[in-house]
Amino acid sequence: MFRLLLVEDDASLGATLKERLQKEGYGVEWVKSKHEAGELCNQQGEVSLYDLIILDVGLPDGSGLDLARDLKMSRHMPIIFLSALSSAEYRLEGFELGAEDYIPKPFHLKELLLRIERVLNKEKQPAELVFPDFAVDLAAMAVVFRDGVKEFLQKRDFELLRFLIAESPRVLSRKEILFKVWRNESHQNGRSVDNAVMRLRQVLRRLNCECIRSVRGVGYQWVLPFNLSANSH
């Protein structure tokens, strides 16, 4: 599941975009200011688990162009700009900052979806979440251990693992996991989450540590730090 960061201060547009993007199967984090977006990205250090930022240029506390400039200095961060400022000067600055696209407002929602899909399809570089004794191969949906053993995961189990890692150290409720990973499929329930966690723990049983912690009455928490790598384990 691709994870998007939406930075848009217009409440109506932001809510509409978030709802539609989630219906398309994306994981979406929505913030309304330059400060919130910066804080969220800085919490993840020099890496990001967001596959794409959809960034409004005109924010209430500063320019989205300035935020993009700050982020580009420390990490690879694919960006699509949204802006009512559609002059050649602003578009040129956006592309000089390495933006994947610059979409003037107003825009057709279908056009935005197609451009997002184009950018995400372009971002096919192999990447791993790297831990001391194993790695998660994001392209292969597999766990790769130090001795070379590779355990391939079911699609839902992989999405759950990635979601747990992305949100760590936050404790995730079963309800939130169902909404984000299973997208509230009517025939799924909390037991589906428990079974998926059990399968992940079985895959990770080779490690002499707890990776997924159960929090009684709430849900689950990923407890190991990680790095993001473009190299093989």
Image (cartoon, rainbow, N blue to C red):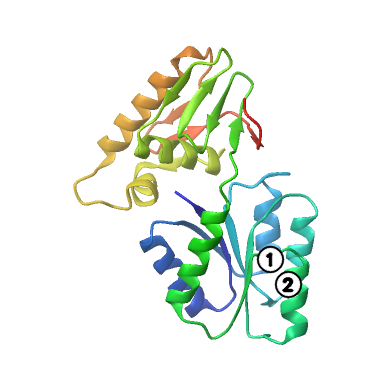
Which label is found at residue 57? none
Secondary structure under the numbered disc 2 in the rendered image: helix
Is 64 on the left-hand or right-hand side of 7? right
Task: Verify CB contact (< 8 Å) between mark 1 and mark 2.
Answer: yes
Quarter of the picture containing the C terminus is: top right
Please provide percent x and percent y for residue 203.
Answer: 41, 20
Label 2 environment density (alpha carbons within 10 Å; few <14, some 14–19, many ≥20): many
Say which amino acid is labelled 2.
Gly
Comes first in the chain, label 1 or label 2: 2
Between residues 118 and 162, which one lies in front from this camera angle? 118
Q: Please state the total of marks drawn on the protein image.
A: 2
Residue 58 x %, y %:
68, 79
Type of residue at label 1? Ala
Q: Secondary structure at mark 1?
A: loop
The part of the image, by quadrant, that contains residue 7 is bottom right
Q: Which residue appears at 38% of the width and 61% of the height?
A: 24
Q: Which residue is mark 2?
A: 94
Which residue, given by chain and number where applicable, does mark 1 sit on?
Answer: 99
- The answer to whether 96 is drawn above or below residue 150 in the figure is below
Instruction: Look at 65% across and 54% down and name the residue there.
Output: 40
Disc 1 to disc 2, C-alpha distance: 6 Å
